[in-house]
Amino acid sequence: MVPSCSPPSIADSAAPVVLVTGGGRRLGAEFCRGFARRGWRVVIHCSHSLSQARALAEELGGGGVARVLPADLLSLSGEEMIAHAASLFGRLDGLVNNASCYCRGGLLEATEEEWEESFRLNFRVPMSLMRAFARRGFPGAILNLLDGRWEKEDPGCAGYLLAKKSLAEATRLCAFAWGKLGIRVNGLAPGLVRPVEGVPLSVMEPLLARLPISRRTTEEELAAAALLLMESPTMTGVILPVDGGMHLHGMPMREKENPQ
């Protein structure tokens, strides 16, 4: 069972286990830290950040608390990934679909390859993992990482945003369909957290200035929200915005004007 109040000791084999895709760095790493502090054992999936994932596992307490699962999400099936993750601690109670790719490109600008990449990693892979998680027949919790713009329009990142919109709809559909199986499915919709690697935080300042709360959303705040959604026994089908009020904004939060 997923803990709701008093988590078991991480030394206890009853401690719940969560798989975090893309868990080796950035937001995924903060999710792993939050779960470990709360008493979960963590399977840290990584694709291109193996050294970072291994360092994180040691930081969290080593193999009794965190184990690394290096894998190419585009090569393995959802069934294979879930089976591998469950084998590391002998159980799997939670899934966090954090891994994603962000591609700029308008409706006319993006290539077919860019569209395919966006939909594969941002929708098809998490959907495959969710289905494999549910097919095991055990209760648990799933969290999908969305985007604060999922209810709005930004044609400048059309493929990415359409994939996230699809994942948001799948979140609600799966929550409705799998509730009687004891599986809760929720979504987390972050606002402006940080730009892509190598780009300074200052590039977000013009967008932050337009928000009701003109400050960026921190990784720590998102990790706390993730724990709330994963541990609350009656929360399902919820898409929680943690975005400084971006979801209240009457205009699309575009990164550039007039995309095609």
Image: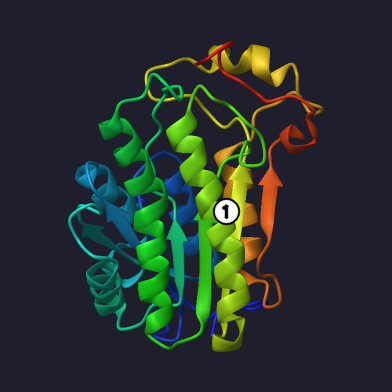
The N terminus: image quadrant: bottom right
Q: Amino acid at mark 1?
A: Ala
Identify the residue at image location x=29%, y=32%.
112
Identify the residue at image location x=65%, y=28%.
216
All told, the count of numbered labels is 1
Where 153 sits versus 72, above or below? above
Where 210 sits versus 25, above or below? above
Q: Nearer the viewer, residue 6 or 253?
A: 253
Identify the residue at image location x=25%, y=54%.
73
* Residue 249 falls in image quadrant: top right
Image spot of residue 233 (x, y percent): 67, 78
Whether residue 34 is visible here, answered yes or no, is no
Q: Nearer the viewer, residue 173 or 215?
A: 173
Q: Nearer the viewer, residue 106 or 71?
A: 106
Q: What residue did someone put label 1 on? A: 168
* Residue 151 falls in image quadrant: top right
Identify the residue at image location x=66%, y=35%.
152
Q: Residues within 10 Å of mark 1 (few under 14, many from 20)?
A: many
Where 177 sits versus 60, above or below? below
The answer to whether residue 83 is left or right of residue 93 is: left
The answer to whether residue 148 is left or right of residue 9 is: right
Which type of secondary structure does the marked residue at label 1 adopt? Answer: helix
Image spot of residue 206 (x, y percent): 66, 12
Image spot of residue 121 (x, y percent): 34, 47
Image spot of residue 106 (x, y percent): 45, 22
Whether residue 102 is visible here, answered yes or no, is yes
The answer to whether residue 158 is left or right of residue 173 is: left
